[in-house]
Amino acid sequence: MLPRDMRGQYSGSLGLALQHYFKISSNEKPSRMKVSSTILTDSPTDLETMISEHDKIIGEYHLKYNKISWDEMVIQDFSFLDLKIKIAEKLLEKCVLCEKKCKIDRQFEIGSCQVVKPIIASEFLHMGEEKPLVPSHTIFFSGCNFICSYCQNWDISQNPSKGMMIDPVKLGLIIDLRRKQGSMNVNFVGGEPTPNLHYIMETMRNSAENIPVIWNSNLYLSEIAMKLLDGFADIYITDFKYGNDKCAEDLSGISDYTEILRRNHKIAQKSGDMIIRHLILPNHVECCSKPIIKWISNNLGLDVVLNIMSQYKPAYKASEHSDISRLPTTDEVDEVVSYAETLGFVNLI
């Protein structure tokens, strides 16, 4: 159960914004993934029919998630969760898991993310995440669909073979062990978890414990991948980097960034709890930080949980870009935080 002092600490607006996460973590209600495993579905073979079946079931899932009790938890032989896994695996044959949409067969070809097999760089109980999340069982995947010039984790994000393969059954047992050791959640991150969506879902099917699933991501997913996360992820930790497409292209090699990130943030907010992270980049207050925060206030509301991060350091290839080759100044950080406060955000962490 959630410690009593933590219940009191997060009983206000933050507790309301993350209420589903806290209830799942304290075992007051089943996780979204567990609920999906109780819904019986057909098992079609072709992708179009599978997606049609998924779209038909999603309404039933949402009704059941809001009402189900532990007494009603009966795991089905082929469930909504199994259907999600089957779709994710099928999508690998012409991969469109992220918005780069390489459309290659990941069994035989290497796409932009360079991920061939799911490789785990590390897994441990992480005490450095946001306070409501710790201790967080954080699982870092190697490889990424972004090439950020300043990536703090470039040693794994740009080295997709660095780490080890772990059978999903074994990883499910490790997740259960970490839960017994006190984890509040299981936190899939990277690099980027998106290229490994099928494996992550298969892993969680092999976990017996009730535990919140965190999707910790750059959120550059395709619409079908976002659909699959609805009914699987309990809380989204999003990395909202840029306020315009030019900066995204220059610093991460990503096109159509703002349209896709805005769309996916709206989808994520409807399907789970959410913490939005924004890392302040030097010289990017006016072009990125303020437009992002303004858009969030207008489209996601002032009660969204927003973590404005000031710990940027010029890593990896940042020295090749004069605008981000230094630390952010105190004035830049204060300006961004003050701007968010002036707009009226109530859950700044």
Image (cartoon, rainbow, N blue to C red):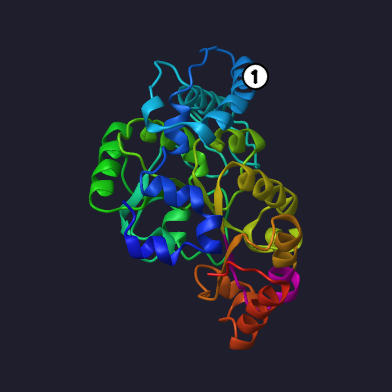
Q: Quadrant of residue 319?
A: bottom right
Callout 1: SS = helix
Figure disc tally: 1
Q: Which of 201 and 33 is in front in this view?
A: 33
Q: Where is residue 90 in the image (x, y as percent from the top left)?
A: 53, 23
- Residue drawn at (59%, 14%) of the image: 46
From the viewer's perspective, is residue 327 above or below residue 157?
below
Q: Which of 62 and 77 is in front in this view?
A: 62
Q: What stretch is highlighted in magenta?
A: 276-290
Q: Where is residue 258 in the image (x, y as percent from the top left)?
A: 73, 54
Crowding near the residue tagged with mark 1, few <14, some 14–19, many ≥20 C-alpha atoms within 10 Å: few
Three-letter residue code for mark 1: Ser
- Residue drawn at (59%, 18%) of the image: 50
Q: In this view, does 252 lie to the left or right of 193?
A: right
Q: Which of 333 and 272 is in front in this view?
A: 272
From the viewer's perspective, is residue 189 above or below residue 103?
below
Instruction: Answer whether residue 42 is magenta in the image.
Output: no
- Residue drawn at (54%, 50%) of the image: 273
Q: Do we see residue 88 in this rendering? A: yes
Q: Quadrant of residue 167?
A: top left
Q: Position of residue 187 (x, y in %)?
A: 41, 50
Which residue matches tag 1?
A: 52
Q: Is residue 155 left or right of residue 265?
A: left
Q: Position of residue 67 (x, y in %)?
A: 51, 33
Q: Quadrant of residue 267?
A: top right
Q: Do we see residue 255 in this rendering? A: no
